[in-house]
Amino acid sequence: MTTTVAFIGLGVMGFPMAGFLSRAGYKVQVYNRTASRAQLWLDSYEGEAFTTPAKAAEGADYVFCCVGNDDDLRQVTTGENGAFHGMAAGTLFIDHTTASANVARELADAASRCGIGFLDAPVSGGQAGAENGALTIMVGGVDADYQRVSPLLNCYARAVNLLGPVGSGQLCKMVNQICIAGLVQGLSEGLHFARAAGLDPAQVVEVISKGAAQSWQMENRYKTMLAGEYEHGFAVDWMRKDLGIVLDEAQKNGALLPVTALVDQFYSEVQALGGGRWDTSSLFARLTNLRDFD
């Protein structure tokens, strides 16, 4: 008997993720707020589109979701025509949205009252990782639910790990964003310093990337940063949303995040330059002649 899955949210991440499930042979039922996006997905993959999350979730053994923020997530789960209203007891909801740990716990409680399992499972790897089936997935929830859905997650992931109870996946994703923010700022300052010192920044990277300074950001972003190209990758607007979640959580748990708070301010300056949709590596732009990036 073919397993039926629903996928809610067909943005730059959800679109290819749902596609991998379809190509793996699962029966896929999709919903997207913009119907034309769902139709575009159907032009590329086998499946069926529905007009509400609840209808997409009907008959599904697993419901996956990847939307924008806490409010979007509430709307497509417990809101009017939300997925929880269409899911049967014993089914499982897997949330790939980067959201707060609080909303994960809130929705897990709501799901439990409906007899539904819930996993918070934010992802890292960006659009390229989603398109190549090479995402890292950080999961919070019950081990039995995690084991049950792992074969499906592996359709589009290179690494999947259970971190602890519900909310743990989101907390791990916060750590991920803290580390990225600091790395990108450090790389930006390094390239800026190299130019100011009269060095060839590309040559500098060629040397230091073979040592302890090496990072994914250095390997994959330094060329576009030096070229002033930021029309790709994870947008500044989304990073600020994520860092806002991080800083809110830090206020609750007492973690001291001075560098993260500072980088968040720097991203606000990039937004003021009109760079809200620029890639997060655009921190380099605020350290250079900003007129070149208008």
Image (cartoon, rainbow, N blue to C red):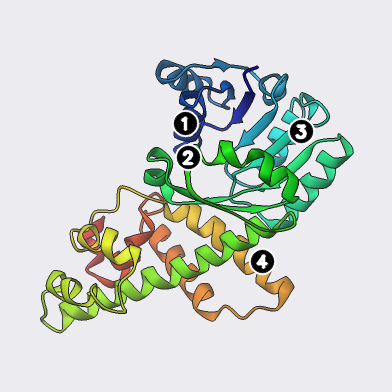
Which amino acid does the dot numbered 2 rest on? Tyr
Percent coordinates x, y for residue 106 in the rendering: 79, 49
Q: Which mark is residue 248?
A: 4
Q: Secondary structure at mark 2?
A: loop
Q: Secondary structure at mark 1?
A: helix
Question: Rounded to the nearest whole Å, what is the CA distance between mark 4 and mark 2?
Answer: 30 Å
Tags 2 and 1 touching, CB below 8 Å: yes
Query: In the picture shown, does residue 62 fall above or below 132?
Result: above
Which amino acid does the dot numbered 4 rest on? Asp
Q: Secondary structure at mark 4?
A: helix
Q: Which residue is mark 3?
A: 79
Percent coordinates x, y for residue 230 in the rendering: 29, 53
Question: Rounded to the nearest whole Å, what is the CA distance between mark 3 and mark 2?
Answer: 28 Å
Packing grade of label 2 (10 A; few <14, some 14-19, many >=20) is: many
Q: Which of the marked residues, 4 or 1, is nearer the chain's N terminus?
A: 1
Percent coordinates x, y for residue 123 in the rendering: 53, 50
Q: Which residue is mark 1?
A: 20
Residue appearing at x 58%, y 23% in the figure: 30
Q: Which residue is mark 2?
A: 156
Query: In the picture shown, does residue 50 fall above or below 8?
Result: above
Tags 4 and 2 touching, CB below 8 Å: no
Packing grade of label 4 (10 A; few <14, some 14-19, many >=20) is: few
